[in-house]
Amino acid sequence: MRRKLTWRGRKAVHSARVLDEVVNTEVRLVPELTGEAQRRAVDHLAELVLLSQAYRHYSYGWIGRRELERRGKGALGRLEALSAPNVQQLTERE
């Protein structure tokens, strides 16, 4: 038996679908990348998939708003860390 989604649940499902669309679009570009760029792109996409999953878990009522916020902040932190240049990248530019 399906339960009726709340407004917040529908919004969470919509957010999950948007993230899925981004991942589906971007994953096609990964094979064109090489080496480190490919690894970073895969890591970024994996974080988006996990965030999409968190939104779905929230919409099902499996996690609460605070847990969704915690997971979202964690995903953003990891995405920022992935985007930051590491020491090796800085020295290679010199």
Image (cartoon, rainbow, N blue to C red):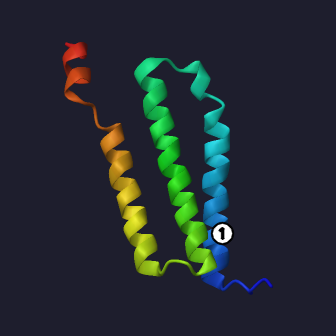
Which quadrant of the figure contains the N terminus? bottom right
Q: Quadrant of residue 52?
A: bottom right
Residue lying farthest to the right in this orientation: 1
Judge left or right: residue 75 versus residue 38.
Answer: left
> What x and y, as percent, mark residue 71?
41, 65
| Residue 79 to residue 6: above or below | above
Judge left or right: residue 70 versus residue 58.
Answer: left
Pointer 1 residue: 13
Which quadrant of the figure contains the C terminus? top left
Judge left or right: residue 5 versus residue 40.
Answer: right
Q: Residue at x 46, y 80 (%)?
A: 65
> What x and y, as percent, mark residue 12?
60, 71
Amino acid type for the residue under numbered disc 1: Val
Q: Residue at x 51, y 45 (%)?
A: 46
Judge left or right: residue 4 versus residue 53.
Answer: right
> What x and y, as percent, mark residue 62?
55, 78
Q: Quadrant of residue 5?
A: bottom right
> What x and y, as percent, mark residue 23?
61, 44
| Residue 32 to residue 83: above or below | above
